[in-house]
């Protein structure tokens, strides 16, 4: 056999060398996984109230790519054997509007399985004209959960006419309407009120109807902390329903409660009946609640509302005047009047009001004590003790826990199909610290886990399927979030994996910052954010702008 020409030998060697070099390159270019995440072998609850089914869930590019048998692996596989897989929970009454600008981790929320929060009982931390930029700033900083918000009717009122009592002129009311319209076009979900507190309490029903009509133009809400959740609860429900009926806005009643010890067992059934009747007439009204017997709010709830009729600063001056203080104590002792709901009367006395956060070194020793005990220690009337602590805290807001609710009423309300869950609490800057409001209430760490542990597993008040529906598809449908709230192929991948036997709230009245357990994995917009109970540092949450935006 004759020798190969030199150029043929070079060609053969080149092919061999090329083959040798290409082998590792071919290995490195192996096909990418079919899915970013595959959740294997879990009991899948779709969020719509259906019974669970065994299935795998494949997630790709932020969305649910497949539900069923998945043979392929993902870039990340999660073994959900013996666990439940459900949509992420939606917190319908959140308070994180300010704290997310400082810290977007929201770990206390994630550890409860929450992937979406709706804030704004007190409005936005910026003016109506700044909301669009505020949303952009949140997105740029990065948040670990999805966030939407309401705009407060009182924000508009105070910007136009200050914080004193009074009736707006037609021109002033029109300015308020323009501000609400600006906020709606920026993407808020509606207009909110907190009518128990001045200056919110100075707004008339008619003025609120006028503002709610602006929100209603594009399917927005009138969302309300009602004027009175105590003795005049039924009146307040009627007012909220009327505002919805005459404005066309959807009505969301924040933290539904019968906060009046003399009315326990009586007011809540009637409240439920009135809301159900309104829904029967075609009025889109519903409510949320948190599953605790104590409310948490500022000590100003014990001060007669008329004190602040000339504004907050003038009210503080009155509280500091010894001569006026004596008359104010008589007014407070007389109990609720139209326009002011006494939290002392609602709680059944000062012995059921506990100091939670005084913001003052001299008063820290009284945290966890009721005001009968505090008054005795200071040799003061409980009202004097409370108001002096309130004044000592300024410019901060001193907080108390008001034990105003009955477990039987909570059970009756949570059973209603139109009731969702809202924590009335903020995200925290760091796990184990107080929430962004500075309020030591266990709801900031325990709410959603408590629903599953106490009302599903321990008491059997709710089925697991219905409890999950209340925290997923139902609020999503109310909010118009058509791409969230259920596990369905093509929708956003907000998904959690939890152990129904182990899920537990650990926060309580004496240790309110203990994180919940049993939520093992949380995925937000397709990104693993809680992995085996640990925050990954991901910031894949989205700012949710309502349909009026743009």
Image (cartoon, helix red, strand yellow):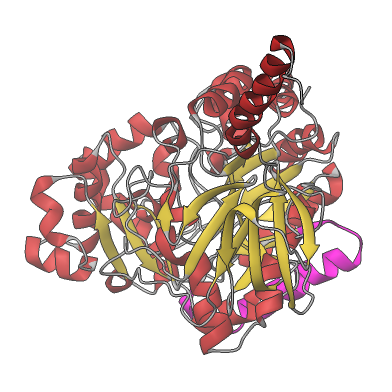
Question: Residue at image x 18%, y 62%?
Answer: 381
Horizontal and vertical percent position of residue 24? 58, 35
* 313 vs 450: above or below: above
Q: Is residue 283 magenta?
A: yes
The answer to whether one can see residue 521 in this image is yes
Question: Residue at image x 56%, y 77%?
Answer: 410
Q: Is residue 278 left or right of residue 153?
A: right
For the N terminus, the image quarter is top right
Question: In the orientation shown, which residue stands out farthest toward the bottom?
Answer: 459
Q: Is residue 172 left or right of residue 426?
A: right
* 233 vs 218: above or below: below
Horizontal and vertical percent position of residue 267? 62, 76
Question: Residue at image x 40%, y 36%?
Answer: 103
Horizontal and vertical percent position of residue 82? 58, 80
Q: Quadrant of residue 217?
A: top right
Question: In the orientation shown, which residue stands out farthest toward the top?
Answer: 7
Give the overall secondary structure of the magenta segment: helix
For the C terminus, the image quarter is top right
Question: In the orientation shown, which residue stands out farthest toward the right?
Answer: 281
| Magenta-colored span | 260-285
* 417 vs 266: above or below: above
Q: Is residue 140 magenta?
A: no
Q: Quadrant of residue 338?
A: bottom right
The answer to whether one can see residue 255 in this image is no
Q: Is residue 436 left or right of residue 137?
A: left
Q: Is residue 348 left or right of residue 479?
A: left
């Amino acid at each position: 056999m004759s020798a190969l020409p030199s150029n043929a030998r070079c060609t053969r060697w080149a092919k061999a060398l090329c083959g040798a070099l290409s082998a590792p390159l071919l290995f490195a270019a192996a096909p990418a996984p079919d899915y970013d995440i595959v959740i294997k072998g879990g009991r899948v609850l779709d969020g719509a109230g259906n019974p669970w089914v065994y299935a795998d869930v494949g997630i790709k590019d932020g969305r649910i790519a497949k539900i069923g048998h998945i043979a392929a692996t993902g870039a990340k596989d999660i073994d959900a054997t013996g666990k439940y897989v459900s949509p992420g929970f939606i917190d319908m009454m959140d308070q994180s509007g300010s704290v997310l600008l400082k810290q977007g981790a929201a770990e206390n929320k994630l550890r409860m399985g929450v992937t979406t929060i709706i804030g704004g009982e007190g409005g936005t931390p910026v003016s109506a004209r700044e909301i669009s930029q505020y949303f952009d700033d949140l997105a740029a900083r990065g948040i670990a959960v999805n966030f939407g918000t309401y705009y407060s009717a009182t924000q508009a009122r105070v910007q136009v006419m200050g914080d004193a009592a009074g009736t707006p002129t037609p021109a002033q009311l029109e300015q308020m309407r323009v501000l609400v319209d600006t906020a709606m076009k920026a993407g808020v979900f509606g207009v909110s009120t907190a009518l128990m507190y001045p200056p919110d309490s100075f707004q008339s029903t008619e003025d609120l109807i006028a503002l709610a009509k602006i929100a209603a133009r594009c399917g927005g809400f009138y969302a309300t902390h009602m004027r009175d959740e105590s003795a005049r609860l039924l009146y307040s429900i009627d007012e909220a329903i009327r505002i919805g009926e005459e404005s066309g806005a959807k009505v969301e009643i924040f933290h539904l409660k019968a906060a009046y010890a003399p009315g326990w067992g009586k007011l809540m059934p009637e409240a439920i009946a009135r809301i159900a009747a309104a829904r029967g007439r075609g009025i889109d009204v519903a409510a949320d609640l948190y599953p605790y017997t104590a409310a948490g709010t500022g000590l100003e709830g014990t001060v007669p509302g008329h004190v602040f009729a000339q504004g907050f600063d003038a009210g503080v001056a009155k509280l500091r005047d010894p001569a006026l203080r004596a008359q104010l104590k008589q007014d407070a002792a007389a109990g609720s009047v139209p326009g002011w709901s006494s939290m002392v009367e609602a709680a059944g006395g000062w012995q059921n009001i506990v100091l939670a956060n005084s913001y003052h070194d001299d008063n820290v020793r009284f945290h966890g004590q009721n005001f009968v005990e505090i008054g005795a220690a200071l040799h003061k009337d409980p009202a004097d003790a409370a108001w002096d602590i309130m004044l000592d805290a300024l410019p901060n807001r001193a907080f108390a826990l008001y034990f105003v609710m009955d477990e039987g009423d909570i059970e009756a309300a949570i059973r209603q199909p139109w009731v969702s869950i809202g924590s009335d609490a903020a995200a925290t800057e760091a796990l184990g610290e107080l929430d962004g409001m500075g309020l030591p209430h266990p709801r900031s760490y325990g709410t959603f886990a408590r629903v599953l542990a106490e009302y599903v597993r321990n008491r059997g008040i709710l089925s697991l399927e219905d409890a999950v529906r209340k925290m997923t598809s139902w609020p999503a449908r109310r909010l118009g979030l058509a791409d969230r709230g259920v596990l369905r192929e093509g929708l956003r991948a907000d998904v959690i994996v939890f152990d129904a036997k182990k899920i537990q709230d650990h926060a309580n009245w004496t240790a309110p910052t203990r994180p919940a357990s049993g939520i093992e994995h949380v995925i937000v917009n397709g990104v693993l954010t809680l992995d085996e109970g640990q925050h990954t540092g991901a910031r894949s949450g989205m700012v949710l702008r309502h349909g009026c935006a743009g």
